[in-house]
Image (tube, grey):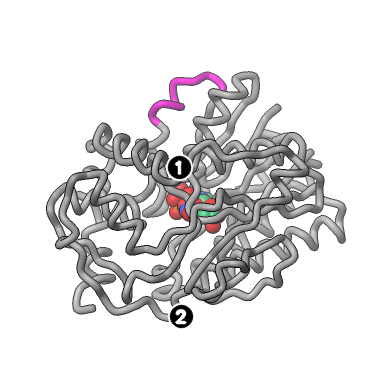
Amino acid sequence: MKILVTGGAGFIGSNFVYYMLENHPEDEILCLDLLTYAGNLQTLDGAMKNPHFRFVKGDIADRAFVFDLFRKEKPDMVVNFAAESHVDRSIENPGIFLQTNILGTGVLMDASREVGVQRYHQISTDEVYGDLPLDRPDLMFTEETPLHTSSPYSSSKAGADLLALAYHRTFGLPVTITRCSNNYGPYHFPEKLIPLIITRALDDQTIPVYGTGANVRDWLYVGDHCSAIDLVLRKGKVGEVYNVGGHNERSNLDVVKTVLRELGKPESLITYVTDRKGHDRRYAIDPTKIETELGWQPTYRFDEGIKVTVAWYLEHKDWWQTILAGDYQDYYEKMYQNR
Ligand SMILES: NC(=O)c1ccc[n+]([C@@H]2O[C@H](COP(=O)([O-])OP(=O)(O)OC[C@H]3O[C@@H](n4cnc5c(N)ncnc54)[C@H](O)[C@@H]3O)[C@@H](O)[C@H]2O)c1
């Protein structure tokens, strides 16, 4: 089986590449990534030596390039992780989110139709469902929850999901979609919450928390997301959406405190900054469908997953220090200074 993994130099995509090389050594993995600020080829160092892995640099929204690649490589499956993925960046510059997340998905699906892939899998997010009130812990997102987005990022992801389902219905493209909650784990770019806390706290720098830190996210260890995608590729029903989450709801403030505790750092590092525009209050995934229909179960509870993640960041300082030395510093100043 030849699997094209787009966005494989990013956080979840790279974890998926390693997961597949380990769990399905008979498969061939071709990674396509544009290496934007979020893509890091160093992350794939460990895969480059594997004869079942190859890397190609390119833009999923570049139609001529993508069609050439598909005609040459004829992938059996496509798993699309490639996306602009940071909500704050989508508020600064929405255009690139529409270009990559919606048009890029359309190009990949057109090329998938032409070569007749066995499966086109779209990686989506729980953010397409909008948010839930903080005072209704009984409410959770199911696959039937209406799409109700808040940011240009989540709107672009919802647009891609609708397009994927339309390609299934209109053209019979064998599409599946997974909508996962917030991920954490190795190779997570240091501008995202958990690595940001770890990398700054290790340096005794302040930890910015939006608003009062009351916003709730549902966290899943990235390896558990990878096992869910793998299961959907092998056993999922085409035309279906599967929610992925592990019932690990935590307020942002709780997350910061848990990580600080794990690092042995004081809570006095926490500083509260002006809230994000339109900040979603709470996300919570109901994963009943993937659990009952496909038998998926997550391996890590939040506290265990955080221990593994903190240990990984301590052992891989070279990886994140290289990123921090780059243009990430400018980005950090722009987002958090004067808030
Ligand atoms: N991070 C999360 O918690 C989370 C949760 C649920 C769903 N998702 C979804 O999972 C996917 C991966 O998220 P992530 O956190 O790994 O993102 P990421 O930002 O770490 O990685 C995205 C990758 O896509 C590449 N890319 C961007 N534009 C491209 C283009 N035009 N052509 C080719 N490659 C391009 C980047 O270079 C990068 O390697 C996204 O679709 C995201 O919406 C993420």
Circle 1 is placed at which residue position?
A: 9
Q: In this view, does 59 lie to the left or right of 109?
A: left
Circle 2 is placed at which residue position?
A: 278
Rendered position, 102 above or below 301: below
Q: Is residue 291 left or right of residue 220?
A: right
**Residue displayed at 65% across by 34% down:** 3
Q: In this view, does 261 lie to the left or right of 10?
A: left
The spot of residue 167 in percent (x, y) is 80, 58
**Residue displayed at 21% across by 64% down:** 270
Q: Distance between the residues labelled 2 and 1?
A: 29 Å
Would you call the spot at circle 2 few (<14 residues within 10 Å), some (14-19), or many (20 or more)? few
* Highlighted magenta segment, given as a residue range: 45-52
Q: Which amino acid, mark 1?
A: Ala
Tell me which label, 2 or 1, sits earlier in the chain: 1
Give the camera-side residue of 272 and 156.
272
Say what secondary structure mark 2 lies in: loop
**Residue displayed at 45% across by 65% down:** 216
Asked if the stretch drawn in magenta spans residue 211, the answer is no
Give the camera-side residue of 38 and 248.
248
The spot of residue 235 in percent (x, y) is 77, 37
